[in-house]
Image (spheres, rainbow, N blue to C red):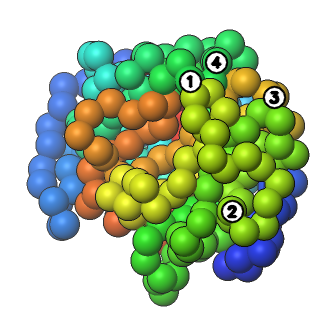
Amino acid sequence: MTAPHTQSQLRAQPPGPTRRTALALGAGGLLTLSGLVRPTPAQAASTIRLDNVPVVLRAGSRAVVTVNRTSGHQARVVFWQRRNTTWTPEFLTTDGRIGYGGLVAGTQRRQGSGATPLGTYGLFSSFGTHGLQPGWGLPYRKIESGDFWVQDNASNWYNRLRNQAQGGFRWNLTGENGSERLSDYGAQYEYSVVTDYNYREQVRYRGSGIFLHVNGRGATAGCVSVPRHVMVALMPLLHPAKVPLIAIGT
């Protein structure tokens, strides 16, 4: 998923101390931050903490989404940008969601567990139900009929977007090898960003399809979700040049 906005490549190619909260309702219903976390100066070390979540930085990273579980499957999700040498919180939601299976180290996750992997992951591509909008920077695919996210552990396309007509996976399986037909989740996947969890080197049975997407009715099956207006705000702010990351903690 390297070439921006190229559908065939989107299918096939891998990408190479907290303080008192003071909230104000911003434009579009977003919660803006005025003292949730003291902005953290960018450091030379590869790991920093934002909203008390460890973030393993990558070269050039200037945009981070932190996910801090508050209770049960609820989480506070904050969007940060690096401005000069300072990490600044831009907006947050207290209605983030994680998986019904809780949190688990990424290397210990099992497919079908409903757990969300702890750690820092890249945000490198996106998909959804709308056409590509001006200003969206990540490679994007509008969901087509027959599009699946492959969870068939026997497939070479494991943890990849693949259309049923292309073959290469058992699209009609259920259970732990059952792939997700993306059109079945039109509300949640209206706006969806793909993480690189278990993507570059797919480990079978570790799990696939860990996205940042729109909230459903409750917990996710392992993804991170946020209210729809947050995803609308994020789509133009995530760009490959910013090397965007998502950091999931407690």
Residue at 73%, 46% in the rendered image: 170
Is the residue 93 above or below the residue 134 in the image?
above
Q: Residues within 10 Å of mark 2 (few under 14, many from 20)?
A: some
Residues marked 1 and 3 touching at CB (< 8 Å): no
Residue type beneath disc 1: Gly
**Mark 2 — residue?**
164
**Mark 1 — residue?**
112
Mark seen at residue 203: 3
Which of the image's four quarters has the N terminus?
bottom right
**Mark 4 — residue?**
109
189 or 193: which is nearer to us?
Answer: 189
**Distance (Cα) linking label 1 and label 4:** 9 Å
Residue at 73%, 79% in the rendered image: 6
Residue at 72%, 68% in the rendered image: 165
Residue 109 picture quarter = top right
Q: Residues within 10 Å of mark 1 (few under 14, many from 20)?
A: some
